Image (tube, rainbow, N blue to C red):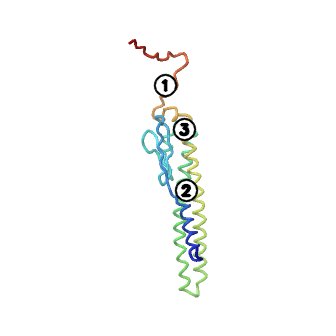
């Protein structure tokens, strides 16, 4: 192999190894209790229950209402919405400061005040970066609280076949009890 071909082969090998990481899968559960919440990912976390989308990240609107009958779940849903809103706000402000930092480049055209312009642009960029990093942390907290809300709700209500809108629990549909009569095979006489 020639010396010029080696970097290209290494790049091609790295691309081939990373391609499976780009694939996504969609799995829809086959059996879900009537009020149970299910977590999906389609460009962002989505929570589904009762055959409809209940909430979507980042703000998780609708989740608190859906899980309102389980106090722990309601508290986590409220925290998810709070952290999600904070993450969205911090992302917007951080991104705006990042773009605004480009104004500091005007200093190259204004030599007497160059360092003021460049210093202002740099401080704006650093502040924007810190805010975006903080937004990422808040987004992770929002997702964590939303999953906690889902788990508390499903443990107490959803996986048992009820929902906060209809707290009737269906009869268990497990295996037959040992004292129940078993079906007898039919006997045919020739």
Q: Which residue does the numbered mark 3 point to in the structure image?
A: 153
Q: Which residue does the numbered mark 2 point to in the structure image?
A: 86
**Disc on the earlier residue, 3 or 1:** 3
**Disc on the earlier residue, 2 or 3:** 2
Helix, strand or loop at mark 3? helix
Q: Where is 1 relative to 76, above or below?
A: below
| For the residues bearing labels 3 and 1, Cβ distance under 8 angstroms | no
**Disc on the earlier residue, 2 or 1:** 2
**Residue found farthest to the top:** 189
Q: List x then y, in percent, for residue 100.
A: 52, 72
The numbered mark at residue 183 is none
Q: Quadrant of the C terminus?
A: top left
Task: Work out how far the residue at label 3 is from the one at label 1, CA to CA, in angstroms.
Answer: 19 Å
Pair 3/1: label in front: 1
Q: Which residue does the numbered mark 1 point to in the structure image?
A: 171
| For the residues bearing labels 2 and 1, Cβ distance under 8 angstroms | no
Task: Say few, some or many: other residues with alpha carbon within 10 Å of mark 1 (under 14 / 14 to 19 / 20 or more).
Answer: few
Q: List x then y, in percent, for residue 158.
A: 51, 35
Q: List x then y, in percent, for residue 15.
A: 54, 64
Q: Quadrant of residue 117?
A: bottom right
**Residue found farthest to the bottom:** 112
Pair 2/1: label in front: 1
Task: Work out how far the residue at label 2 is from the one at label 3, CA to CA, in angstroms.
Answer: 24 Å
């Amino acid at each position: 192999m020639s010396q010029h071909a080696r970097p290209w082969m290494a790049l091609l090998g790295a691309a081939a190894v990373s391609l499976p990481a780009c694939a996504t899968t969609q799995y829809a559960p086959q059996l879900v209790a009537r009020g149970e919440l299910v977590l999906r990912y389609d460009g962002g976390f989505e929570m589904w229950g009762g055959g409809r989308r209940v909430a979507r990240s980042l703000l998780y609107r609708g989740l608190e209402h859906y899980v309102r009958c389980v106090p722990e779940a309601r508290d986590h849903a409220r925290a998810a919405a709070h952290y999600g809103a904070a993450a969205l706000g911090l992302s917007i402000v951080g991104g705006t400061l990042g773009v605004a930092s480009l104004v500091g480049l005007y200093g190259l055209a204004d030599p007497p005040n160059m360092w003021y312009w460049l210093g202002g642009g740099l401080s704006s960029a650093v502040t924007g970066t810190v805010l975006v990093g903080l937004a990422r942390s808040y987004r992770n907290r929002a997702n964590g609280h939303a999953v906690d809300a889902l788990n508390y709700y499903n443990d107490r209500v959803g996986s048992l076949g009820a929902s906060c809108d209809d707290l009737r629990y269906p009869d268990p549909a497990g295996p037959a009890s040992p004292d129940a009569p078993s079906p007898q095979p039919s006997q045919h006489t020739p």
